Amino acid sequence: MKKFTDVHDIGPLDAAVAEALAVKADRFAFTHLGRHRTLLMIFFNSSLRTRLSTQKAAMNLGMNVMVLDVNQGAWKLETERGVIMDGDKAEHLLEAIPVMGSYCDVIGVRSFAGLKDKAEDYEERVINQFIRYSGLPVFSMEAATRHPLQSFADLITIEEHKTVERPKVVLSWAPHPKALPQAVPNSFAEWMNATDYDFVITHPHGYELAPEFVGKARVEYDQLKALEGADFVYAKNWSAYADPNYGRVLSADRSWTIDAAKMGVTNNAFFMHCLPVRRGMIVTDDVIESERSLVIPEAANREISAQVVLKRILESL
Ligand code: CP
């Protein structure tokens, strides 16, 4: 595997999940693969789970790991070509990428959407520059439009907990005080659409995701109706995608918060969220603390999804 930025890079999902479960059963079986190999993890944005789980996965594979927080201690990086660099950005990404690439064998990048320029965000300018100019395998640790390591972990978690072959999975928008990217819901939709699950997306009017991510999903604007009979409820906030409101918060309507009454219309559904989550906004305390909450196993599976991706990259070197 030379890159991992979307669901297509992982190949058949049944094989990927089987490999994940094998890795989970014996996570130190491939320690030889990473010997004398170095992973560089580059963060343009904050992280708890991605940072720790990916580093742990790399260590399970015997890799050396370096972490760079671009905005804390490194030179501020310019990402646009053709600009006069007379501001606060001291280094251009076009020099920084090959320099960083000279110190490692694999690069992981976290670079969120700026939510100001839709075209720039949706062309994935930053991670694509790493792919183009590093000459190394590059994987996404959440880019502008997708979070594939999260979605892979979500899929593993659903496969581990489903009790029917074709579960009903509902992605529900939920309120949040700040504008968040569409990367997690886009990516979750992309991965769910690659399964044969019964997949439904529910959100208030104005929060439609990009059509290429909605795909074959059913969109239901009535949240309660969408949740009826659900086996898995995946809550997430996102800002508006459609113009002229791209990147804006249109509503923080707490009638969309996932609570016990809403979970009551489901098929005793499991609750999922990628974390971090704002209690009282996205979900109530009782739901996230309930025995049907999968948020911790889901986060734990981030180590497994990262390890499968790194294993496949190392096998291709
Ligand atoms: N879910 C997730 O990616 O968490 P972090 O932002 O903490 O890495």
Image (cartoon, rainbow, N blue to C red):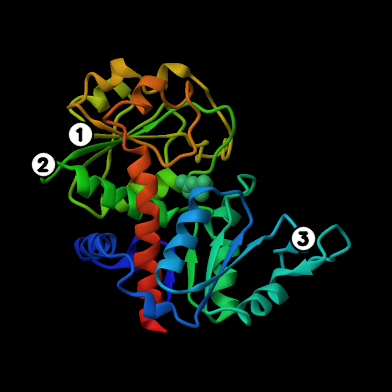
Residue, disc 2:
164
**Element type where label 2 sits in the image:** loop
Give the mark nearest the N terminus, 3 or 1: 3
State the CA–CA distance, disc 3 to disc 1: 45 Å
**Callout 2 touching callout 1 (CB < 8 Å):** yes
Q: Quadrant of the C terminus?
A: bottom left
Q: Quadrant of the N terminus?
A: bottom left
State the CA–CA distance, disc 2 to disc 3: 50 Å
Q: Does the image show residue 94?
A: yes
Residue, disc 3:
76
Q: Amino acid at mark 2?
A: Val
Residue 189 vs residue 255: left or right? left
Residue 6 vs residue 106: left or right? left
Q: Position of residue 112 (x, y in %)?
A: 57, 51
Q: Residue furthest left?
A: 164
Q: Position of residue 160 (x, y in %)?
A: 21, 48
**Element type where label 1 sits in the image:** loop
Decide which of 200, 237 is in the foreground and name it.
237
Q: Which mark is residue 231?
A: 1
Residue ID at (42%, 42%): 274
Decide which of 100, 64 is in the foreground and name it.
64
Q: Is residue 83 above or below residue 313?
A: above
Q: Position of residue 219 (x, y in %)?
A: 30, 35
Decide which of 67, 249 is in the foreground and name it.
67
